[in-house]
Amino acid sequence: MGLFSLVSACTESPTYVGIDPDRQTMALTEVAEKHARGQRVWCVPYARSLSGIEIRGNAKDWWGKAHNLYERGAEPVVGAVMSFRATRGMSLGHVAVVSDVVTDREVIVNHANWHRNKVSLEMAVKDVSKNNDWSLVRVESQPGSFGSLYPVNGFIYPTGDG
């Protein structure tokens, strides 16, 4: 299976804006190797490889595990991990890596397993929270189409950022 069959993008030619190209290559290579072994692609290992944030366990636990290890906050920064809360439909939570900050209310993320067993590149995420604090978002699931509301804990910053 070719690498491009493992990737979905909300743009015709993903550029990996703002993401370290070596990290992106490494993360996508790991995805291809997992597929070759018949393993599922999950958001956590992909986000860990892409961001360099060394947290293990389910995505829903990243926010708590980051406490005292990494800076956390409500401001999106390129390279930071967006930590989604667990919901009924997303019981393990979710993590995505910010690849670009478009405006104070919109970012672009790269993440895995939003579309089952695929990496999704350059998907827009809009802050729709009442207080403009990134506590509630909509994710671009298909080009130009924003889906359900998702609660977010905030952003976990790689060492040296934040």
Image (cartoon, rainbow, N blue to C red):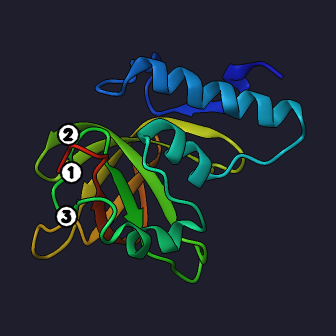
Residue at x 50% of width, y 46% of height: 47
Do callouts 1 and 3 mark residues in contact (Cβ within 8 Å)? no
Residue at x 36% of width, y 57% of height: 82
Residue located farthest toward the bottom when viewing the structure as drawn: 88
Q: Quadrant of residue 15?
A: top left
In screen coordinates, is 87 left or right of 20? right
Viewer-side label of 2, 3: 3
Query: Is disc 3 placed on a helix, strand or loop?
Result: strand
Q: Looking at the image, which is closer to me, 69 or 116?
A: 69
The CA distance from mark 2 to mark 3 is 15 Å
Numbered circle sitting on residue 101: 2
Numbered circle sitting on residue 73: 3
Amino acid under disc 3? Gly
In screen coordinates, is 109 left or right of 4? left
Numbered circle sitting on residue 61: none
Query: Is disc 2 placed on a helix, strand or loop?
Result: strand
**Dot 3, how many residues are within 10 Å of its Cα: few (below 14), some (14-19), or many (20+)?**
some
Q: Is 152 drawn above or below residue 119 in the view shown?
A: below
Closer to the N terminus: mark 2 or mark 3? 3
Q: Give the image location of residue 12, x and y in percent.
A: 47, 19
In screen coordinates, is 55 left or right of 99? right
Reading the image, the residue beneath label 1 is 76
Residue at x 30% of width, y 69% of height: 68
**Is residue 143 visible to the viewer in this orientation of the structure?**
no
Amino acid under disc 2? Val
Amino acid under disc 1? Pro
Query: Is disc 1 placed on a helix, strand or loop?
Result: loop
